[in-house]
Image: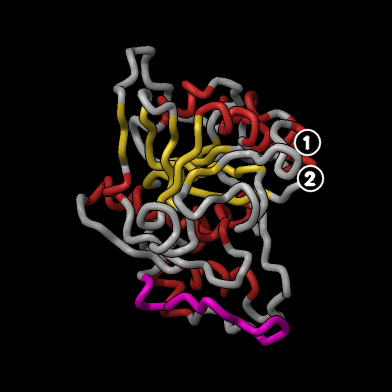
Amino acid sequence: MTSLRPWPGLNRRQLLAAPLALATAARARPVVPELPLPPVVDLSALLGPAKQQGDRMTCAYFAATALAEAAVARQTGLPVIFSEQYLTDIKHGGSRLPADETVDLYAVMDIVQDFGMVPASARPYLQKQVPGELVQRPDAALLALGKQVKLQMYMLPYSYRIEDLQRRMLRRPAVVGLALPHNAAGWRDDGLVEPVPGLVPSGEDAREDFPNHFVAVTGYDLRQQMFHFRNSWGADWGRGGYGRISFATMRTNFWAHGDAFMLAPA
């Protein structure tokens, strides 16, 4: 897979080691001026309906697809629903499907930048796939269709300030990795995400003990002190597929305090 285009000549180890310098080198768009934040931001209208990843460990693909949908909707004014299956089939095409499809978000963003996106109807998502089966790579016609959608990834500057993430919400949604277990303790059916004392820690302990679950953050509410995000567990979870996480929990369980990503038209 090619290196991420915003950082030519840098390998992934360097990307992880110096996110602030890299974000600057990435020609990231200027931060919104330090004006007072609006009390409420809600970008969910840019996204399609809530989706269900099923039994597969594909949250990174769903979060990246949510950003792609939002970027295109913001540019065109028209809603769009893209295919996660297109991305997973490119990732594993020509090989056997692994039992664990967990992947880092960098790899997914690489695929989006290199191969674009296709409508969900052109490559419907399979909630169940048999590990070990041979994955068919998208054919030339579908790849050509996907490359008509050109998107560019941006990694947000490394920051411990929740306000920095809030300011990014003034433009478009962002993906964050939450140091909380996948669809287990800490995830309430009503969509509120919080650490559970003695079971789900926060801060460094959480980041060491649990894998990341990627979600698309779609806004915030200053009065409630909450971020809102679209999950990938279907419309029956949370509030129509959307969840909430307090500013305090985001601060301690936001993986590495800096791995937040955006997509914009190239």
Residue plotted at (66% across, 41% down): 196
Residue range highlighted in magenta: 120-134
The quadrant where residue 203 appears: top right
| C-alpha span from label 2 to label 1 | 6 Å
The type of residue carrying mark 2 is: Asp
Q: Residue at x 45, y 47 (%)?
A: 243
Asked which secondary structure carries label 2, the reply is helix
What label does residue 205 carry, if any?
Answer: 1
Residue 79: x percent and y percent? 25, 58
Residue 216 or 261: which is nearer the viewer? Answer: 216
Nearer-the-camera pick, 147 or 88: 88
Q: Is residue 130 in the magenta section?
A: yes
Q: Specify the principal SS of the magenta part.
A: loop
State the image quarter where residue 170 is shown.
top left
Residue at 41% of width from left, 51% of height from top?
242
Q: Is residue 74 placed above or below 144 in the rendered structure? A: above
In the image, residue 178 lies at what x, y percent? 61, 43
Label number found at residue 65? none
Disc 1 crowd, CA 10 A, few/some/many (<14, 14-19, 20+): few
Check if mark 2's residue and mark 1's residue have beta carbons within 8 Å.
Answer: yes
Q: How is the image coloured?
A: secondary structure
Q: Is residue 89 left or right of residue 31?
A: right
Residue 76's spot in the image, x, y percent?
A: 22, 51
Left or right of 61: which side holds 95?
right
The residue under the point 44% across, 32% down is: 226
SS class, disc 1: helix
Task: From the viewer's side, name the closer residue of 44 and 180.
Answer: 180
